[in-house]
Amino acid sequence: MKSIASRRIQGIQSLLGKVRSSREINPKERALMAEIRRYKRPPGMSDTLARMLEGVIKKIWMSTPNTKHRHILNHDEMREICLRTRELLLLEPCFLKVEPPITIVGDVHGQLYDMLEIMNFLRFPQEIYLLRGNHETRCVNRQYGFYDECKRKFPRNGIELWTTFQHVFNCLPVAALVGSRIFCAHGGISEDLVSFKQFERVYRPTDICDIGLLCDLIWSDPSTTNDLYEPSPRGVSAVS
């Protein structure tokens, strides 16, 4: 998964970094949380949801490696976050058009604080944009640990929770254009992409097939040596 965040929000996020190591709620943190509550809450977001998000993020900040996951996130909170995220994603186009200034972030491989920034998407949907990657597909995250993690951490309803996450992933945008000049995707360019108008025919929710435009955007690998498209040694999509 890649994320794109505008600089407008970076001032607040830099302050967040200064209080992450704190294990006590201090006046600075209280003031920061109050500022976040005032900052561009999406229309229709309830006070209950806003408080839940703030509480979840704060509990993660205050956690240690020995903190049990059930003391940080419960099933109902995770399900609510997924459902609300899905609603917001479907309000966006499949192909995002974003104006600079912007910060483009590469792969987020589970780094805790990067994931915390992504959770801010619900609160700042017009300041943070998410793009789908190859691990946001059912076949990959079923095989490489996420499915087992859901079952291990939530023995009673982990499979249901994993399925809920798939519904979110199937709504993610797949590409973005920054300032009409910079094309962003998790993978590379597709040989099938001849016009940006093709994205208007992509209807979400959708899973990713093992061939075609969407597959290439999340699986293909760019190359500085190839002049043409060649089969990828990974066995899926191409090197271009």
Image (cartoon, rainbow, N blue to C red):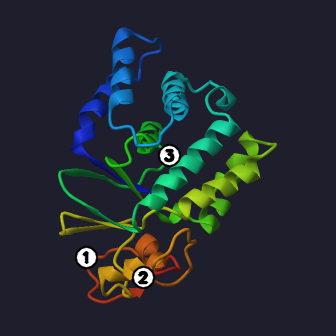
Image mark count: 3
- Secondary structure under tag 3 reads loop
Please say whether residue 202 is visible from this viewpoint: yes
Q: Which residue is mark 1?
A: 224
Q: Quadrant of the N terminus?
A: bottom left
Q: Secondary structure at mark 2?
A: strand
Sequence-earlier tag: 3 or 2: 3
Residues at marks 2 and 1, CA–CA distance in whole angstroms: 14 Å
Residue furthest right as drawn: 156
| In front: label 1 or label 3 | 3
The quadrant of the rendering that contains the C terminus is bottom left
The residue where tag 3 is placed is 110
Question: As shown in the figure, which amino acid type bears the numbered disc 1?
Answer: Thr
The answer to whether residue 240 is visible is no
Q: Which residue is pictured at 44% across the width and 59% down the height?
A: 91
Q: Earlier in the sequence, mark 1 or mark 3?
A: 3
Tell me if 189 is positioned left or right of 63 in this view: left
The residue lying at 47 percent from left, 57 percent from top is 89
- The label shown at residue 238 is 2
Q: Is residue 18 above or below residue 5?
A: above
